[in-house]
Image: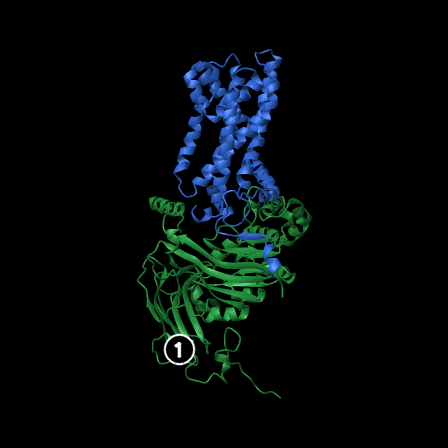
Chain colours: A blue, B green
């Protein structure tokens, strides 16, 4: 009997350690992640006529609106870059971050009925959201590249450059930042819903505190630092620099964004993990 | 003697009652303050047993308290208890949808829990896509599902609709498909809630059969159901929970008997005469129901050999097609039989006169020792109840007047009902 005592496959206890993150479990359920991604991708546009074309329409119209409102009416500088390109690069990257954050932040509340019936590593859910948003982002990035090709061929003032190699890293940072914030918020809203209200308009407001609609370089020094405090700022600027060749590729800002992302992701994952075991009692 | 595959030790679960609001945060802060000083959680000391009928003072209740049991490999364990006994909480802890407050559960082998069938089914996706999605949620890998796909579709019997979105399925088809996925899980331990209470009868039997296959093949099953019949058919061991405490564990037949004989005084107190207020807005309503013996004495405790009459007084305000009063008799929570006025007088179905009526219904004789309850209803047959009262009457029968040794039909002979049949010597 004694030797048996050791080989339990699973021990359910009230509390686990803070760093007992069970990444192995997550890996074992990778097929589920894939299924969720598929579900999100396929189900959203069922029974629509335009289907996946909606992926294009959304950023396209936002870009046009921004071009008219901020470019034409308000006359904000775009550093000499064609405004369509300038805004689209900003919107596409900001949208990815914002959607990751918004959707993951409701993980527990939205999925309470599934979570209440079946166990699987809860982290699969936010991860799948980030991945399915990545597909959507990919489609939009394709649109951006088409637009960029058009401008390059017509000889506009844009220089896609070697920093394009940095883009995958930037995407990873955006995803991790959105995921980290989202998981943190979703964990905190299981008991107290107050934060939910802050998130919805907070994300919207944060966009104005990032260089989506204006280039960081045109700001006076003292404001620049303030805007750069937004961890997305450094990422968006670098993203735009890679594609368009203008803007501010500041390694300091980017380094700060990276550090910020790592910290927030760690806090997010740990908090999420702490809450996931018994959130069903409070949600 | 198989190995122990589940070991539950001092398992307890506390829930907080009432609303979460500003009061919650003060408790949280207090709890945190105790924690950083290295003291125990102050709210674990309080809390009371979970008895819904008794109004408690504490905001915390123990939904489960100090539960200990082992499950051996290959056992099929039925978990029995009335509503609120902690069955669902135990299943939730075992299936890891929530964590225990104290104690631990140790498990050896892969667990599949079916607290519900069709979890995560997406209405817009086709049957095929949902099989993969649901299978993955339940912990199957993609290759595993692919390998079993045909078998699953075959079992569900919805082959023709496999590429149709499940939102177009009838509820029966939906359940069949969902259960088919669940039934093909390859896990050593299966935890099953009352999912069999859905679907048509033929399919239910198929599911029970499938589950028996599972427990017959060395796998372990934990099964919760209100249906003592299916628990007895399926399980060899039982656990009886009451108000969050484990009352007894052991052979399923002992447990089932104990469960059925355990006086649950707070939910089944004797009611022998009950009157209801006027409901002029209804087409018909029940005015009074009472119980009496041969001598018209109204009472709730009867000798097993005493004839019991149910008296049923109702008023008809307007005529309804297909009208019939009916009574349903239950023993220990199990339906014994229905009886309707239209069984003996079909004319009520076509024309129900307006006015007040009192019927005296002779109940079967003898009624075995036990607790009975009577549901009364005025129905438009097969459509709806015009007026209905569940457990309007509750009564007990006891052996008082005789020695049960020779008349064992009245008490401990097996079977739900007793009847004295006609034995005639013909040769």
Position of residue A54 measured from the top left corner of the image (x, y, whole percent):
55, 29
Quarter containing the C terminus of chain B = bottom right
Quadrant in the rendering for residue A148: top right
Q: Quadrant of the N terminus of chain B?
A: bottom right
Q: Chain of mark 1?
A: B
Asked whether residue A47 appears in the rendered view, the answer is yes
Count of marks, rendered view: 1
Point 54% across, 51% down: residue: B171
User: Regarding mark 1 in the picture, which secondary structure is present there?
Assistant: strand
Residue most toward the front? B37
In percent of width and height, residue B17 lies at 38, 52
Viewed as shown, does residue B415 lie left or right of B263? right
Front-lying residue, A11 or B37: B37
Q: Position of residue A154 (x, y in %)?
A: 60, 12
Query: In the rendered view, would you say B305 is above or below A151?
Result: below
Q: Which of the 4 image quadrants contains residue B323? A: bottom left
Residue identifier under label 1:
B302
Q: Residues within 10 Å of mark 1 (few under 14, many from 20)?
A: some
Left or right: residue B151 versus residue A219 is: right
Q: From the viewer's perspective, is residue B190 above or below residue A55?
A: below
Looking at the picture, does residue A114 appear above or below residue A95? below
Quadrant of residue B204 within the rendered picture: bottom right
Residue A26 screen position, x and y as percent? 58, 42
Q: Nearer the viewer, residue B320 or A228?
A: A228
Side of B350 where B216 appears, left or right: right
Foreground pick, A218 / B29:
B29
Specify the farthest residue to the bottom. Answer: B427
Residue B343 seen in the figure? no
Q: Residue at x 40, y 33 (%)?
A: A198
């Amino acid at each position: 009997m004694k030797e048996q005592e050791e080989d339990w496959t699973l021990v359910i206890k009230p509390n686990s350690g803070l760093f007992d993150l069970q990444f192995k479990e997550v890996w074992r359920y990778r097929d589920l992640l894939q299924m969720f991604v598929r579900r999100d991708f396929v189900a959203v546009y069922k029974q629509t006529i335009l289907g996946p074309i909606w992926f294009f329409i959304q950023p396209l119209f936002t870009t046009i609106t921004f071009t008219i409102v901020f470019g034409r009416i308000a006359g904000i500088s775009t550093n000499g870059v064609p405004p369509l390109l300038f805004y689209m690069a900003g919107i596409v990257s900001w949208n990815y971050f914002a959607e990751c954050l918004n959707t993951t932040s409701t993980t527990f509340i939205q999925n309470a009925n599934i979570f209440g019936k079946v166990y699987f590593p809860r982290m699969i859910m936010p991860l799948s959201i980030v991945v399915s948003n990545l597909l959507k982002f990919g489609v939009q990035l394709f649109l951006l590249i088409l637009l960029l090709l058009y401008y390059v061929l017509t000889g506009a003032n844009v220089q896609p450059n070697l920093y394009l190699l940095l883009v995958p890293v930037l995407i990873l940072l955006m995803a991790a930042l959105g995921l980290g914030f989202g998981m943190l918020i979703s964990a905190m809203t299981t008991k107290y819903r107050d934060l939910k209200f802050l998130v919805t308009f907070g994300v919207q407001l944060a966009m104005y505190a990032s260089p989506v609609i204006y280039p960081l370089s045109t700001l006076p020094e003292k404001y620049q630092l303030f805007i750069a405090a937004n961890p997305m700022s450094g990422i968006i600027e670098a993203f735009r620099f890679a594609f368009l060749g203008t803007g501010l590729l500041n390694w300091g800002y980017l380094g700060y964004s990276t550090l910020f992302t790592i910290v927030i992701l760690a806090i997010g994952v740990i908090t999420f993990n702490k809450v996931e075991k018994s959130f069903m009692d409070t949600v | 003697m198989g190995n122990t595959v589940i070991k539950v030790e001092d398992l307890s679960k506390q829930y907080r009652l009432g609303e979460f609001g500003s009061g919650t945060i003060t408790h949280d802060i207090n709890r945190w303050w105790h924690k950083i000083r290295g003291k125990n959680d102050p709210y674990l000391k309080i809390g009371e047993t979970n008895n819904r009928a008794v109004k408690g003072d504490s905001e915390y209740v123990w939904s489960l308290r100090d539960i200990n049991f082992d499950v051996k490999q290959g056992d099929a364990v039925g978990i029995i208890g009335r509503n609120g006994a902690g069955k669902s909480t135990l299943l939730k802890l075992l299936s890891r949808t929530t964590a225990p407050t104290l104690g631990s559960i140790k498990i050896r082998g892969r667990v599949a829990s079916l607290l519900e069938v069709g979890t995560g089914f997406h209405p817009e996706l086709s049957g095929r896509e949902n099989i993969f999605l649901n299978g993955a949620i339940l912990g199957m890998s993609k290759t595993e599902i692919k390998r079993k796909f045909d078998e699953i579709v075959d079992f569900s019997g919805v082959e023709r609709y496999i590429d149709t979105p499940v939102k177009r399925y009838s509820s029966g088809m939906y359940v069949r498909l969902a259960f088919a996925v669940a039934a093909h899980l390859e896990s050593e331990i299966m935890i099953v809630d009352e999912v069999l209470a859905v679907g048509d009868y033929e399919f239910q039997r198929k599911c029970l059969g499938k589950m028996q296959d599972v427990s017959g093949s060395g796998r372990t099953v934990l099964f919760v159901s209100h249906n003592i019949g299916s628990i007895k058919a399926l399980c060899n061991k039982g656990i009886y929970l009451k108000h969050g405490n484990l009352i007894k564990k052991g052979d399923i037949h002992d447990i089932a008997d104990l469960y059925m004989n355990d006086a649950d005084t707070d939910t089944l107190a004797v009611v022998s005469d009950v009157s209801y207020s006027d409901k002029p807005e209804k087409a018909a309503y029940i005015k009074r129901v009472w119980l009496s013996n041969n001598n018209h004495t109204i009472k709730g405790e009867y000798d097993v050999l005493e004839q019991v009459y149910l008296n049923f007084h109702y008023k008809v305000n307007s005529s309804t097609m297909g009208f019939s009063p009916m009574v349903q008799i239950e023993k220990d929570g199990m339906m014994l039989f229905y009886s309707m006025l239209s069984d003996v007088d079909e004319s009520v179905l076509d024309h129900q006169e307006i006015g007040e009526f009192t019927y005296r219904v002779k109940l079967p004789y003898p009624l075995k020792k036990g607790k009975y309850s009577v549901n009364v209803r005025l129905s438009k047959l097969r459509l709806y109840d015009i007026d209905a009262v569940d457990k309007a009457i509750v009564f007990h029968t006891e052996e008082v007047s005789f020695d049960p040794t020779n008349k064992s039909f009245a008490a401990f002979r097996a079977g739900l009902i007793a009847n004295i049949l006609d034995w005639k010597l013909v040769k």
